[in-house]
Amino acid sequence: MQIYLSTLTENDYAESLDMIEAAFRDVPHSNHDEHNLVAQLRKAPEYRYELEVVAKLETGDIIGHAMLSEVKIVNGEDTYTALALAPVSVLPEYQQQGIGKALIQAVEERAKADDYTTVIVLGDPGYYHQLGYQTAADYDITAPFEIAPEYFMVKFLWDQLEAYPHGEVVYPESFN
């Protein structure tokens, strides 16, 4: 079985949404609305198609998806542009094979190439810590909603930053 990663195209929109819905169908902590979130994010003025990657079988069937969207980290007068990783999905029968990790690394590489420095994620710390994400609260980065701090994480894409962003994450309207 060969799997390849590619930038999502408009021809993939419908199939990718169906795949995202199927991937989250039996996930207990999901609100089962991730596919609608992706559809909304694609309509946002700040949408960047190159920060959306799919995993496909050699048949062209989509089996995985990852997306980064711009968010702000605000601290008083200071505003930093960052990215939110949401959602990441892989069809259940293809999970535990490194596809999610490959998708995340692919979008992170694209973000770094575009000079983004910071990625925020809400998810399972057991999984995301393995990929270099750390508890955001350790860097004085907070969520705009109530969440146990260990589930809200950050990754800095550069080894050294002049100044690390800190403050509250502000999601654009398209996340609502």
Image (cartoon, helix red, strand yellow):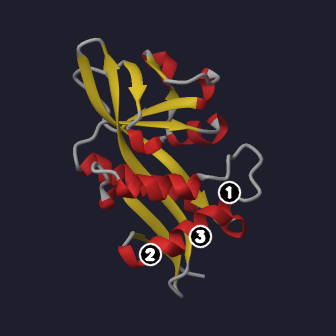
1 left or right of 158 in image: right
**86 or 94, which lies in front?**
86
Residue type beneath disc 1: Phe
- Using a 10 Å C-alpha cutoff, classify the residue at mark 1 as few (fewer than 14 neighbours), some (14 to 19) or many (20 or more): many
* Quarter of the figure with the N terminus: bottom right
Residue 97 seen in this snapshot: no
Q: Dots 2 and 1: beta carbons under 8 Å?
A: no
Q: Residue furthest top?
A: 76
C-alpha gap between disc 3 and disc 1:
10 Å
What residue sits right under mark 2 in the picture? 12
Q: Residue furthest bottom?
A: 59
Q: In percent of the image, x 41 and y 34: which residue is there?
A: 171
Q: Is 129 located above or below residue 166 in the figure? A: below
Q: Quadrant of residue 43?
A: bottom left
Residue type beneath disc 3: Asp
**Looking at the image, how many numbered discs can be counted on the residues?**
3
What residue sits right under mark 1 in the picture? 24
